[in-house]
Image (tube, rainbow, N blue to C red):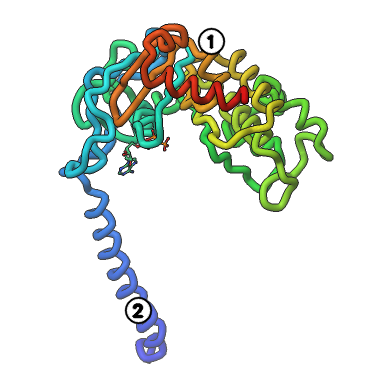
Amino acid sequence: FILYRLQPQVKQLDGARVGLMALTSAVDEVISLLDCSDKPYIRSGSIRFPSLTQGICLKSVDFYYNPDEKPALEDMSLSIPACKTTAIVGPSGAGKSTLIGLICRFYDATSGEIYVDDYPIQELKLDDWRHQIAIVSQDVHMFSTTVLENIAYGRLDATEKEIIAAAKLANAHNFITQLPQGYDTKVGDRGIRLSGGQKQRIALARAIVRDPQILILDEATNALDSISEHLIQEALNTLSQNRTVIVIAHRLSTIEQADQIIVLNEGRVTEQGNLKQLLKLNGLFARLYNLQHRNVHN
Ligand code: ATP
């Protein structure tokens, strides 16, 4: 009788058991998909990384997205010195973003070596290494919340004082204080619209609040208003004093002020040096530079 009374519950339990079994097999499937012991993936090394003192060095690096296609980077050797600003320039498809992807260890080189100071990059603890890097990308995402929280997104435990200090370094503080509710002004889809230059400076502040040793900037290709451009350049000049800055550069002003310029073309380094040296070479860089210079001054 009791069993009879309990039948519906037992049925329910059984249904749950069947459900659980189905779930277990789905979990097994996911685990087998995740088990990529025979596939290449990014493994963390074990070396704790305190600070970049010499720089990042690529030695004969090849990188293929697809083994059947031509390499995105080919026999690439270059060095990015610590605490200097390096501009990476080159036409579309030259390999600029791929190079950044390798430095951030989104991918590993197919062959060749990348050294961070004296360590092969893959021997560093991945979290540690990525923690040192902040990237400001071209298309800045603004969350539908306050300016303060948009900057704090860079480091969730940042204090208000630290956020304001970062905004000042990014040359964003003045425009923020002129917004209707200052740092508490809502931005994003449900807030006020910011200009491209203002968004870039918020993104810069978001990166600075993390106090990264390496700042990577993918400069916007679309023109910013000249005031924003000047303010961003000024912020970068301050930031680069004690940081390694790598810029995928499109603007003449950035290129002109970089300590070194690396020119990429079709996955190879074609020229490397400072502005004076590269203009003297009279190669691809000089051609691109003169063309852009003429466009700016006409
Ligand atoms: P852009 O200035 O247009 O952003 P880029 O210099 O950053 O170009 P990369 O994006 O690094 O160039 O691309 C280098 C080469 O690798 C190109 O031939 C590109 O088509 C190819 N490539 C880039 N990303 C991938 C991908 N995810 N899968 C396959 N090929 C890719």
Could you say where residue 259 lies in the image, as x and y percent from the top left? 48, 10
Q: Looking at the picture, how far across and down is residue 217, in whole percent?
A: 51, 27
Q: How far apart, in angstroms, are the residues tagged by discs 2 and 1? A: 63 Å
Residue 242: which numbered mark, if any?
A: 1
> In terms of secondary structure, where does tag 2 sit?
helix
In the image, is 227 to the left or to the right of 59? right
Q: For residue 184, which quarter of the picture?
A: top right
Q: Position of residue 16 (x, y in %)?
A: 36, 74
Which residue is at the front of the view, 294 or 189? 294
Residue 234 on image: x %, y %: 65, 17
Marks 2,1: beta carbons within 8 A: no
The circle drawn on residue 57 is none
Q: Which residue is mark 2?
A: 15
**Residue visible at 55% across and 40% down?**
139
Above or below for 297 versus 21: above
Residue 126 visible in this rendered orientation of the protein = no
Q: Quadrant of ligand 1?
A: top left
Q: Where the N terminus falls, by quadrant?
A: bottom left
Q: Looking at numbered disc 1 in the image, what kind of residue is underneath it?
A: Asn
Q: Please tell me how crowded label 1 is: few (under 14), some (14-19), or many (20+) other residues with Cα within 10 Å.
A: few
Front residue of this view, candidates 252 and 3:
252
Q: Is mark 1 within 8 Å of ligand 1?
A: no
Dot 2 or dot 1, earlier in sequence: 2
Question: Is residue 116 found left or right of 243 in the rendered image?
Answer: left
Residue 232 shows up from this direction? yes
Amino acid on which the number 2 mark rests in the picture: Gly
